[in-house]
Every structure is written in structure tokens, then in C-alpha cells.
Image: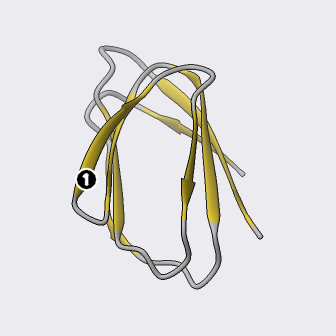
Amino acid sequence: GRFVDPPGRAWNDFVHHTNELVTVAEGRLEMTIAGNKIVVEPGDEVFIPRDTLHSVENIHHATTRWLYGYD
């Protein structure tokens, strides 16, 4: 799937029962995965294991476009 998020948009405290892969196409995200914060930039891929608490926030000054998929 694809998300197009304005600056400051946050998706908080999600848990999925499948693995997830996130890739940033444009902009910057701050992700919190199991309590660990990372900054994700264009071209970066992040693997989120199933049943892991995670949040995503657009910390870019403009729109961030990112892709996600589940297995």
C-alpha cells in the first residue's frame, strides 16, 4: 500500500499479526519500533516483525510518501 502524509501526521501504537516492510519514497519518517526510535529517509527500508508495537510520524517539512506491505 501507499501513504501520503502531511507534515506532523502520526500513526501511533499499531500492532499487526504479520510482518511489515516500510520504504520511504519521499520525505522523512521517525519510526518507533518496540521503543527504539529511528529516522527513515528515501530509499531506506524498515522491517517490522509481527506482533511488535510501532508508530510512524512524518517529521519532514513537507509531504512524505511511503510504501508498506505485509506478508
Amino acid type, label 1: Asn
The quarter of the image holding the C terminus is bottom right
Q: Position of residue 7 (x, y in %)?
A: 31, 27
Taking 65 as reference, is 38 above or below it? below
Point 62% across, 62% down: residue: 20
Q: How is the image coloured?
A: secondary structure
Taking 39 as reference, is 35 above or below it? below
Residue 8 sits in quarter: top left
Point 57% across, 29% down: residue: 44
As helix, strand or loop, the secondary structure at mark 1 comes to: strand
Residue 54 in the figure: left or right of residue 35:
right
Residue 30 sits in quarter: top left
Residue most toward the right?
71
Q: Position of residue 9 (x, y in %)?
A: 32, 41
The residue identified by callout 1 is 36
The residue closer to the viewer here, 33 or 7, is 33
